[in-house]
Image (cartoon, rainbow, N blue to C red):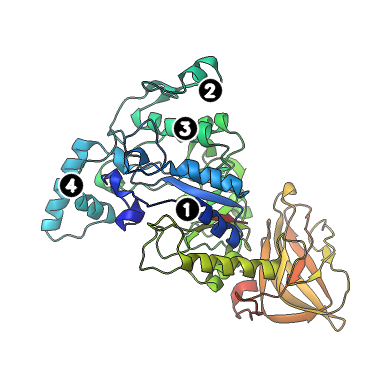
Amino acid sequence: MNTFTGREWGSGAEDPKWFAPPRLDVGQWMRAYKAAGAEQVMLTVKHHDGFVLYPSRYTPHTVRASLGAPDVLDAYVRAARRAGLKVGLYLSPSDGAELPHAWHARWVAEIRQKQARGEPLTTPERVALEDGTRAPGGLGRFGNGSPVTARTVPTLVPGDDRAAAVRSGRLPSFTVMADDYDTYYLNQIYELFTQYGPIEELWLDGANPWSGSGITQKYDVAQWFRTIHRLSPDTVVFQGPQGVRWVGNEKGVARRTEWSVTPSATDPWTVLSGGLPNDSTDPDIGSRARLLAPTVKYLQWYPAEADVSLRPGWFHHPGERPKTPAHLMDLYEKSVGRNASLLLNVPPGRDGRIDAADVASLTAFGRAVRETYGTGLPAIGPGAGLSATGLPATGPGTESVSAPGAPRTFDRIVLGEDIRYGQRVERFVVRARTGGVWAPVAHGSTIGHRRILALPAPVTADAVRVEVLRARAAVHLLPVTTHLRRAPGGAPARSPAGPAVRAPRSALIR
């Protein structure tokens, strides 16, 4: 909906008829995502405004009320599967369409008084005032104070086409203890998994735009997680237990020391964000000191996902331009290359297509990644140089040494751990041999599933070795590879000097 209102945050009072793409070329979306190297695609099924991109049985605020708009989710999932891409879905827990109508009317009156006094308005207040003559488009369930009672999911509606399947057991049915809104949200989760699955990732945002205005909804996330697990035990939940976590910023940049094992004082099955302090924004979330803190009761494998938008905003606005391929390449190295996944937001325009400028940037970026690193790291690919033997180190001080060969020039070194054994390296140094002399060329702390080390300047050497200086247990390194970065367009690009080798964010790209 925000694509058609020109907003970044919606109010929930938008007219569904405003969502009016002349067509949806979802096949073109998939081609653009694949050109960038995506392995999984993620659709925002419902953002904070509550407008739903499939004809849900549980709210009038959906594409069903739009003028001829199709089931966007169905088209998206089918196109992704045809393209061989995994599927993720974003379902915002916050829902402006479900704000209670009486509360919303009082709130808008208060905002008008605030505006008359010349006081600045927040973004939620501003967009509510813009749509102030309209009531929220849902049924008033968000934060309405309804009691928690026994409910059945799916809650069958009159003429429900699933009734026979539920009665026969072909579709599951659950009894839950929930209030009005949690029941609504669980019913939407049920629709997603039983009608559009399989779903590889479910993305749960933690935003609550109206909490500062006196209304909020207490989520029973433990019940959400249990329901998701019963419907689809292999689905990865963003901000869910044993899922993936927010990297802590919306810049697409991971920490230089990025641990996949994180501690918590709270059971991760009972909270969003895994119980991490400050919503996982702390610089240190997985050091030994953090793991051994007296308050820690739980540990979980909780790798980072780094989200960022291709454009300045999360939604397509005609006057904005996409990030350049070089900028995207830098983000790739600072996310995928720092033990995270890159979640790159790519917003289609009002015409139902991804902008030509965006496609060009994505295509050049994907080509540069492939030309520099090949198609399947850490195996050798185009642009690769030396390959280390990858002997697993057995502890600190042990070396993984490359096989000698003809001298090659490189400015990138790629390391990786076999994470079937966990993430163990805490400090390492990489040395290169030139003219029979070993010299350090890079060092760092964590490695994880992938670590890309950008050298200040190209190095010519006939062998490379990794020395693990500190580790939590026996280390299992993957084969080491060296690469010469290719700029978008194909020419070698000199890596800028800087601290990238010093120790101390739709498409998902790993």
Label 3 residue SS: helix
Q: Mark 2 sits on what residue?
A: 172
Residue neighbourhood size for the residue with mark 1, other residues' Cα within 10 Å, grouped as few (<14), some (14–19), many (≥20): some
Q: Position of residue 197 (x, y in %)?
A: 55, 36
Label at residue 191? 3
Q: Mark 4 sits on what residue?
A: 108
**Disc 3 to disc 4, C-alpha distance:** 33 Å
Q: Give the mark, 3 or 4, whose residue is nearer the N terminus.
A: 4
Quadrant position of residue 255: bottom right
Q: As displayed, is residue 276 above or below residue 219? A: below
Q: As displayed, is residue 130 above or below residue 229? A: below
**Disc 1 to disc 2, C-alpha distance:** 34 Å
Q: Mark 1 sits on what residue?
A: 25
Q: Position of residue 78 (x, y in %)?
A: 54, 43
**Disc 2 to disc 4, C-alpha distance:** 42 Å
Label at residue 54? none
Q: Nearer the viewer, residue 169 or 237?
A: 169
Q: Give the mark, 2 or 4, whose residue is nearer the N terminus.
A: 4
